[in-house]
Image (tube, rainbow, N blue to C red):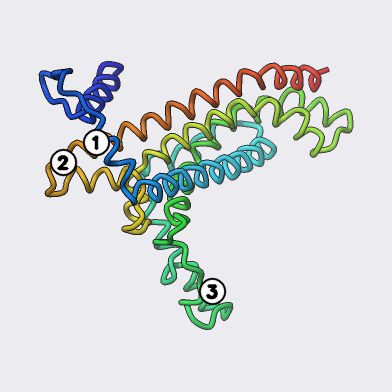
Amino acid sequence: MSLLFWGGIFVVFMRSLGMTPPYAFADATLRFYETVSRDESFAASFVLTARVAAMSSLAAGLLGSMIALLASLSTRSGWGIRLVLNLPLFTPYIVAAQAIVLLLSQSGLLSRIFYGTGILSDMMEFPTLFYDELGLGASLGLAFKETPFVALMVFPYFLASHRTYGSVAKTLGVGLWLRLVKIYLPAAMPAIAISVLICFTYGFTAFEVPRMLGRTYPQVLSSWSYDLYMGSDPEGRSLAPAIGMVIVSVNAISAYVFFCIFRRLHKRLAITRAGSLA
């Protein structure tokens, strides 16, 4: 797996420099990176990609954590909840995107219910959530699929803290809000942060959901790279890897910055957990 992963990145990097087998380093050039960066579509695509990744990961982190917390407080056994949370993970992203379109589009199930109950006088009054310039539709599609993943990752931490120190604190008369702040969140925060990071990096590279639920312009970087690679212009086959390396670089930098910050916060989280346990 490491060979395939790093080998793929190596090949893309070489091709982004204009080199083909046997990788003559004398022919390396940064011309394709310059061409991409000067393109008027690059800034708009980069901002849209970052916005979609950030909105979807934060929404998934918030909703997934809430689901995990409520599930941990309402169950004595975790296997049933884990089974339920595992089921959406088997659904492909393209199927999830189609499902949310059928649910939340202006002609979807929810708008039909509102129209049938008289809340809306016309189904077209339902807000437009897809194919917008802000990338809201793509963010909803990604969050719809990522929320069960976050809940599954965070649930064991909430459940363990609730069964141990949370139950003791409840016996001593500590309220739910204080238990949440002092016990549950400090115990689950590392898992929440890691889950949000994973969702962000995936959202930044996602292709099928933004392709289905986003506009044709501006496009997310992955969709723009695909169109360049599949287009008739031969130069696009070198511009596409350059965009791919931009995506990889952003994800690598994001992960590095996250772990640098997390190391500094780790001691504070440990102190908070120790104080909570005391």
Distance from the alpha carbon under mark 1 to that under mark 3: 50 Å
249 left or right of 170? left
The quadrant holding residue 273 is top right
As rendered, which of 78 and 211 lies closer to the eye?
Answer: 211
The residue tagged 3 is: 114
Spot occupied by residue 45 in the image (x, y as percentages of width and height): 38, 48
User: Element at badge 2?
Assistant: loop
Q: Are marks 1 and 3 in contact (CB under 8 Å)?
A: no
Query: Mark 2 is on which residue type?
Result: Glu
**Which label number is shown at residue 235?**
2
As rendered, which of 7 and 172 lies closer to the eye?
Answer: 7
Distance from the alpha carbon under mark 2 to that under mark 3: 50 Å
Asked if 220 appears above or below 77 in the picture, the reply is below
Q: Residues within 10 Å of mark 2 (few under 14, many from 20)?
A: few
Q: Do the residues labelled 1 and 2 touch (CB within 8 Å)?
A: yes
User: Element at badge 3?
Assistant: helix
Mark 2 vs 3, N-terminal side: 3
The residue tagged 1 is: 32
Kindly identify the residue that appears in the image at 47 percent across and 77 percent down. 123
Distance from the alpha carbon under mark 1 to that under mark 2: 9 Å
63 left or right of 5? right
Q: Residues within 10 Å of mark 3 (few under 14, many from 20)?
A: some
Kindly identify the residue that appears in the image at 56 percent across and 46 percent down. 59
Spot occupied by residue 96 in the image (x, y as percentages of width and height): 39, 50
